């Protein structure tokens, strides 16, 4: 009880600072930069992960056939500073694990990192082959840029409406600021979510008339991948392996593997973990390792044992409506 009271006390100055900042931006005292290019921001209200990477990959697949797409990320955990454009010499230590994942996965997009989003966008639009759409990774709180469209994510099992300001809870800012979002996506939903559950969540989140809400789930690939090949995960049904994760929440992956009868031991690290030499030695003692795609980009050059990653896919309800809303925004912005 005392600990909770202390957290509540410490959350007050945190809340005051964020509310003052937002008030200054909302009233125009602090200015947000606007750009003559479609910019879509993807973010959340909570500390930690809510599924940003899968939705960014979904948007890349949706848009990259018709538009030159750039992803601009802060590059969390990288050992570099300033603006960096990903190239064949890049690795996760230079640009961060998630940008490296994008760069390895999508050959026809621009991947860049910069903690200063205004500078980063200016660098991108001054490239010889400049992007036609910019996706801002984890940028909901970065008010220095005014995106044309803002997508806010919230975890089905941890709705922001039921959370508190840090450190009492995990919110980066108060729930009232969710009204800045054009689209709210409830991520990691149960596959059997029904209409009553959706209606209840909509009421909890107090969705505005100007906002659209969508519900999504995670789908794990049926294939495992390494540097050069792929195998059906079914082939590992009767083989014990080690699962290595350095993500915000590995519960969904663990439940998936357990529910499907796989035999594994779990080696867990914190989100965006920077694997040390001792970590690598520990991991490499295992003959067969399966990891997440985000962790793979940091491990595949260091691990000598057999190493595979299991991709995830983003599945969204009302996919046609969602895609249309995104494409309509870009077409309107470009007209």
Image: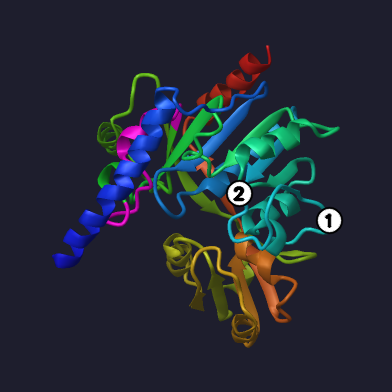
For mark 2, give the secondary structure: loop
The residue lying toward the viewer, choosing from 320 and 233, is: 320
Q: Residues within 10 Å of mark 1 (few under 14, many from 20)?
A: few
Residue located at (29% from left, 37% from top) = 201
Residue 263 is at least partly visible in this image: no
The quarter of the displayed image where residue 332 is located:
top right
Residue located at (43% from left, 49% from top) = 188
Which x, y percent locates residue 261? Answer: 47, 71
Residue 225 in the image: above or below residue 263: above
Residue 23 is at least partly visible in this image: yes
Task: Specify whether residue 333 is painted magenta.
Answer: no
Query: The C terminus is located in which quarter?
Result: top right
Residue located at (44% from left, 61% from top) = 249
- Mark 1 lies on residue: 88
Give the Cα separation between the discs numbered 1 and 2.
19 Å
Q: Residues within 10 Å of mark 2 (few under 14, many from 20)?
A: many
Residue 154 in the image: above or below residue 300: above
For mark 1, give the secondary structure: loop
What predominant SS class does the magenta segment belong to? loop
Which x, y percent locates residue 73? Answer: 62, 46
Do the residues bearing badges 1 and 2 touch, measured as CB atoms within 8 Å?
Answer: no
Mark 1 vs 2, N-terminal side:
2
Which residue reaches farthest right? 128
Task: Specify whether residue 175 is painted magenta.
Answer: yes
In this rendering, would 156 be left or right of 78?
A: left
Task: Please tell me how many numbered marks the rendered image carries.
Answer: 2
Q: Which residues are magenta?
A: 166-183
- Mark 2 lies on residue: 74
Which x, y percent locates residue 168? Answer: 26, 56
Q: Which is closer to the viewer, label 1 or label 2?
A: 2
């Amino acid at each position: 009880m005392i600990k909770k009271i202390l957290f509540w006390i410490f959350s007050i100055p945190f809340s005051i600072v964020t509310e003052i900042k937002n008030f200054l931006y909302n009233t125009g005292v602090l200015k947000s930069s606007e750009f003559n290019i479609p910019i879509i921001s993807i973010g959340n209200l909570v500390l930690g992960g809510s599924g940003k990477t899968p939705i960014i990959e979904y948007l890349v697949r949706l848009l990259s056939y018709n538009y030159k797409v750039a992803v601009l990320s802060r590059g969390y955990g990288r050992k570099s500073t300033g603006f960096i454009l990903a190239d064949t010499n890049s690795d996760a230590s230079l640009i961060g694990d998630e940008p490296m994942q994008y760069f390895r996965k999508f050959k026809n997009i621009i991947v860049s990192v910069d903690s200063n989003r205004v500078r980063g966008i200016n660098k991108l639009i001054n490239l010889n082959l400049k992007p036609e759409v910019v996706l801002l990774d984890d940028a909901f709180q970065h008010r220095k840029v005014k995106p044309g469209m803002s997508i806010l994510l919230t975890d089905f099992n941890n709705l922001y409406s039921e959370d508190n300001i840090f450190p009492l809870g995990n919110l980066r800012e108060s729930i009232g600021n969710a009204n800045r979002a054009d689209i709210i996506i409830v991520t990691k939903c149960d596959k059997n979510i029904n209409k009553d559950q959706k209606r209840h969540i909509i009421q909890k989140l107090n969705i505005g008339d100007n906002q659209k809400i969508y519900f999504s789930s995670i789908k794990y690939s049926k294939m495992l991948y390494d540097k050069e090949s792929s195998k059906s995960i079914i082939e590992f049904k009767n083989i014990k392996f080690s699962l290595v994760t350095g993500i915000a929440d590995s519960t969904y992956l663990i439940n998936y593997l357990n529910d499907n009868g796989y035999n594994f031991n779990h080696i867990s690290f914190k989100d965006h973990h920077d694997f040390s030499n001792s970590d690598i030695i520990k991991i490499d003692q295992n003959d067969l390792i399966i990891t997440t795609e985000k962790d793979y980009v940091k491990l595949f050059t260091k691990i000598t044992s057999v190493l595979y990653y299991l991709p995830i896919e983003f599945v969204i309800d009302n996919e046609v409506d969602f895609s249309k809303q995104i494409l309509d925004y870009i077409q309107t912005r470009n007209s």
